[in-house]
Amino acid sequence: MAPLSPRRPDVPAWLAEAVLYQVYPQSFADSDGDGIGDLPGLLGRLDHLAELGVSAVWLSPCFSSEFGDAGYDVADYLSIAPRYGTNADLAALVEAAGTRGIRVLLDLVPGHTSHRHPWFQQAAHDPDDDRYIWSDRITAPVHEWIPNQGRRGGFYRANFYPIQPALNFGYARPHPAEPWRSPVDAPGPRANRAALREIMAHWFALGVAGFRVDMAASLVKDDPGQLETAKLWGELRSWLDREHPDKVLIAEWGDPARSVPAGLHADFLLHFNGRGLRSLWDNGTGSQGSWAHGEPCYFDQGGGGSPAEFLSAWQAADTAIDGRGLVALPTANHDFSRLACGPRTREQLACAFAFLLTWPSLPVIYYGDEIGMRYVPGLPEREGSQFGTEARQGSRTPMQWDDTPGAGFSTADPGAFYLPLDPAADRPSVAAQRVDPDSPLSHVKRLIRLRRDTPELGTGHGVTVVADGYPFAYLRGTTHLVVVNPRREPAELALPQLTPAAEPLLAHGVTATADGVRAAGFSYGIFRL
């Protein structure tokens, strides 16, 4: 494969160098003993993030909400949900994180609100209000039109759950026979675009560094190729560059080849859009949806997978982005199974993190993955977590800080926790792994430190694949070789032109010889050439 990513991305320098950590706030740390995590609890655990070495933290939705969909049903974009604290608590968190070199990003849900939001409460009674999408009859898609209970009557279009009325950003293809199809420059869509700027500016003023943008591709309806949606984000990026040049937007779009050229600073490879991410991590267990493909992933102990699909997706995105932004690569998220899932055990995770933290992407660590918290099957539904066949609650369990009965998450009775703790007798904890030099946590700390201290391993240098089997080997720039072997069986690779002078920087089961490398099972090695 030809070298990829040869240029430093056109984003704020701090993002280009970032290691991002996702916090699910209700499950991270509870300070007041009610069994639900909160912002003061997170503030009290910032030293863990600083010791880990992450430089930015993204909080899943923490705005006021009735929590029918775990906070993705926003009732007030300008205030923190009382169960998490106050706006002052958020400001204190931002300040305390900043003293540790950590930026804070929030989760922006631009496509819909809660049906409890004042905007919707007004629109439900006012036939002249077009902030939402209204029809006097049910039309396609039928399941998305919900009867209105207000004086206005008719039906409103919802995203996902009925409690989430879609904000009106217009339709790319208006039609006179369907008057609810507002053009993108109608008053309602214009008001909503202006509101996005107002919301962002409000939190920027409190020191927030940016936003992860929920379902960023879905704003303009009936938008072939998301062309009008891309224009919308391009306008917002121009505003950001002019007014807030150090702030960033990271899309949940799942198609970096479209979203980054449109103006988003970064976009995730995601489980529900193509197989690039799934071909790495999805071993067919845990939360499975209609997107599941049932084939072995590369990080599979049996060695039945291949990185080829990931590499194809990466190359397509990298070519289209052309240095304008970043591809974000997560270990997991609140909607997708954790790395430690099904037959994949904690001993297999070090090589996965070695790949994540030496590839020229924006690495994103889901809370608890650094200690190998596992996906917990069979849990009860909580706040919309069961989405069809996708049992997302298994990836949302309380953080495991220590080995006490409550795992250090909360002083509440464990029966009152937001979700049950992992019941496994050998569940990992931060406290235990902190003193174990061969624990997943210790490996991740060393890998983050090496990435931070070695610019060639970051986003500003190219990557050239030299072997795409078991082991997987690639050059970073021209000076560093990375080898990972995620299967149980050992592997060898002949590289006589590279390895004779190779100096190990971090080696876990991989040795360089005059002729190549020998890799034990579940191993990795990073070498200076």
Image (cartoon, grey):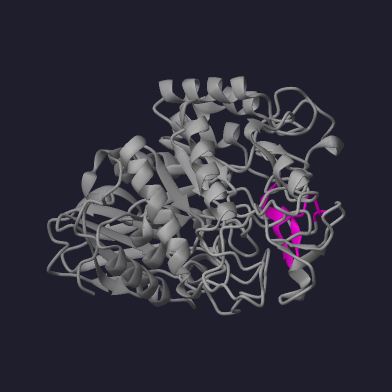
User: In what quadrant of the picture does the N terminus appear?
Assistant: bottom left
The boundaries of the magenta stretch are 379-396
Q: Quadrant of residue 239?
A: top left
| Residue ID at (47%, 74%) | 303
Which residue is pictured at 20% across the width and 72% down the height? 2
Q: Nearer the viewer, residue 353 or 364?
A: 364
Q: Residue at x 48, y 21 (%)?
A: 95
247 inside magenta stretch: no
Q: Residue at x 58, y 62 (%)?
A: 344
Locate residue 434, reporting x and y percent: 52, 33
Question: Residue 103: which quarter of the image?
Answer: top left
393 within the magenta span: yes
Q: Position of residue 367 (x, y in %)?
A: 57, 43
Q: Is residue 114 above or below residue 172?
A: above
Where residue 102 appears, x then y in whole percent? 43, 30
Quarter the C terminus occupies: bottom left
